[in-house]
Image (cartoon, helix red, strand yellow):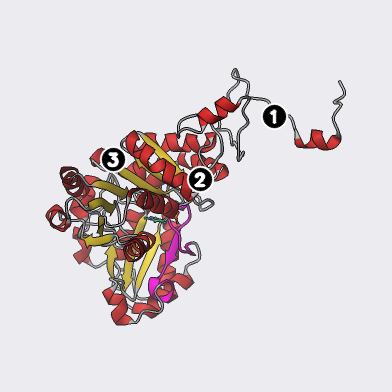
């Protein structure tokens, strides 16, 4: 039958039938819609009342984004989740939603730079006090806490680039005792290697940009809540902030998550081999990888994590020049700032992100002049090692017998 409407009307109102309930798509449908249509004013008004009603507007909720939120809550063992536009969106959203002027925050000293910056900014502009602690000592945390002003404890499962694995069980138990809400950034471990909610955390935050999506093609973040009340308290603030996940980004992240456990296995196995071989070279003065015996967090890492992760760093005895030469000589590994993707990435803070700092300032920041950070990908490990050996140049390779005590155990 001929459609009687104008061609402009027909072009706008394309065929858009609800899915046939008898034939469900295998992949999560991408609902790339900013808003949702209703048949009655009452139904729309009712849907607007909270986070769990029908979809109204995609800043408040979207079916593809909801699929990601439910998947992440399931992976982390949480009650529910909120997906964000980026990891920083998730971290800023949670901090802004929960903190008020006059509150006190205790945070781990070695934190992701962006998190450190938001906390400093909140301290300066909103009268929020921040104390930094090592994260390895629950007694130090209890001493730093100021009841009842201490509102949040902020931690990370694996810190970057030191590979520090703090004492999450001890710190989270202390936070529970003191009635302080705990937030743990689990981006570097992913729920495959650690599930902080199972260790007593209240909120887990993620940069899903990293291992969860895993292919360096999307930005995203998430907060996963142990308790639905906490999510309902945070949700309205995040809707106001507008740092919501885009449906296509959520869809790409869901696609990446399917292979997360397989990828993590390869990241961990490759990183362990590279860490061990780097540690055996005379031109490498230190290797920082929590799964390597001798790392300060080795004991904790073995109990808190089920693998060492994909991030390692090492210090070249040749200092700044050697670090710069290494990152410019690699061919398979790429020089880029992110981490957690399938490809190996290297960076040298002293000649990139921290190039303005002189030797003393670098030392104060805990960054060696020859420190190279590696996000180990899932390429063939022998190809990666050949690339590294070539980039390191002559003068290494042989393995002095003294390193025999280095044991790398996966599992
Ligand atoms: C990258 C990263 C973030 C920030 O995430 P974005 O997605 O870049 O906003 C936060 N925490 C950690 C540990 C990260 O590695």
- Neighbour tally class for label 1: few under 14, some 14-19, many 20 plus, Cα within 10 Å: few
Quadrant of the drawing holding the C terminus: top left
Cβ–Cβ below 8 Å for labels 3 and 2?
Answer: no
Residue tagged 3: 197
* Stretch of the chain drawn in magenta: 333-353
Q: CA distance from mark 3 to mark 1?
A: 41 Å
Q: Earlier in the sequence, mark 3 or mark 2?
A: 3
Query: Circle 1 sits on which residue?
Result: 16
Residue wearing tag 2:
245
Local secondary structure at mark 3: helix
Element type at mark 1:
loop
339 within the magenta span: yes
Of 63 and 241, the residue lying toward us: 241
- Indicate the quadrant where residue 83 lies: top left
Q: CA distance from mark 2 to mark 1?
A: 24 Å
Which label's residue is closer to the chain start, 3 or 1? Answer: 1
Q: Residue, x 40% and y 67% (percent of image)?
A: 389
């Amino acid at each position: 039958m001929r459609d009687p409407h104008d061609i402009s009307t027909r072009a706008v109102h394309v065929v858009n039938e609800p899915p046939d309930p008898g034939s469900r798509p295998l992949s999560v449908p991408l609902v790339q819609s900013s808003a949702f249509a209703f048949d009655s004013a009452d139904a729309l008004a009712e849907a607007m009342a909270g986070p769990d009603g029908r979809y109204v507007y995609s800043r408040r909720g979207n079916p593809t984004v909801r699929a990601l939120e439910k998947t992440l809550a399931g992976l982390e063992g949480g009650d529910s989740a909120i997906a964000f536009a980026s990891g920083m969106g998730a971290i800023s959203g949670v901090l802004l939603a929960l903190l008020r002027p006059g509150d006190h925050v205790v945070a781990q000293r070695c934190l992701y730079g962006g998190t450190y910056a938001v906390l400093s900014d909140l301290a300066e502009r909103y009268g929020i006090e921040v104390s930094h602690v090592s994260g390895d000592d629950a007694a130090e945390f209890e001493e730093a806490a100021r009841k009842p002003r201490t509102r949040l404890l902020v931690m990370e499962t694996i810190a970057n680039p030191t590979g520090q694995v703090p004492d999450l069980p001890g710190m989270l138990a202390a936070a529970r005792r003191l009635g302080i809400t705990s937030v743990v950034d689990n981006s570097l471990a992913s729920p495959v290697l650690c599930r902080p909610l199972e260790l007593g955390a209240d909120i887990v935050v993620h940069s899903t940009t990293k291992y969860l999506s895993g292919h360096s093609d999307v930005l995203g973040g998430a907060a996963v809540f142990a308790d639905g009340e906490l999510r309902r308290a945070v949700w309205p603030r995040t809707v106001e902030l507008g740092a919501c996940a885009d449906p296509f980004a959520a869809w790409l992240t869901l696609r990446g998550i399917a292979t997360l456990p397989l990828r993590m296995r390869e990241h961990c196995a490759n990183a362990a081999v590279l860490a061990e071989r780097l540690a055996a070279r005379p031109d490498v003065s230190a290797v920082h990888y929590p799964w390597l015996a001798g790392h300060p967090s080795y004991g904790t890492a073995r109990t808190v994590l089920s693998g060492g992760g994909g991030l390692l760093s090492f210090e070249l005895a040749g200092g700044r020049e050697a670090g710069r030469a290494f990152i410019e000589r690699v061919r398979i590994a790429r020089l880029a700032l992110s981490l957690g993707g399938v490809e190996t990435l290297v960076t040298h803070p002293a000649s990139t992100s921290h190039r303005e700092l002189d030797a003393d300032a670098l030392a104060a920041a805990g960054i060696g002049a020859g420190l190279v950070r590696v996000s180990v990908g899932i390429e063939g490990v022998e190809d990666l090692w050949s690339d590294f050996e070539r980039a390191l140049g002559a003068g290494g390779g042989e393995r002095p017998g003294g390193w025999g005590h280095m044991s790398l155990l996966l599992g």
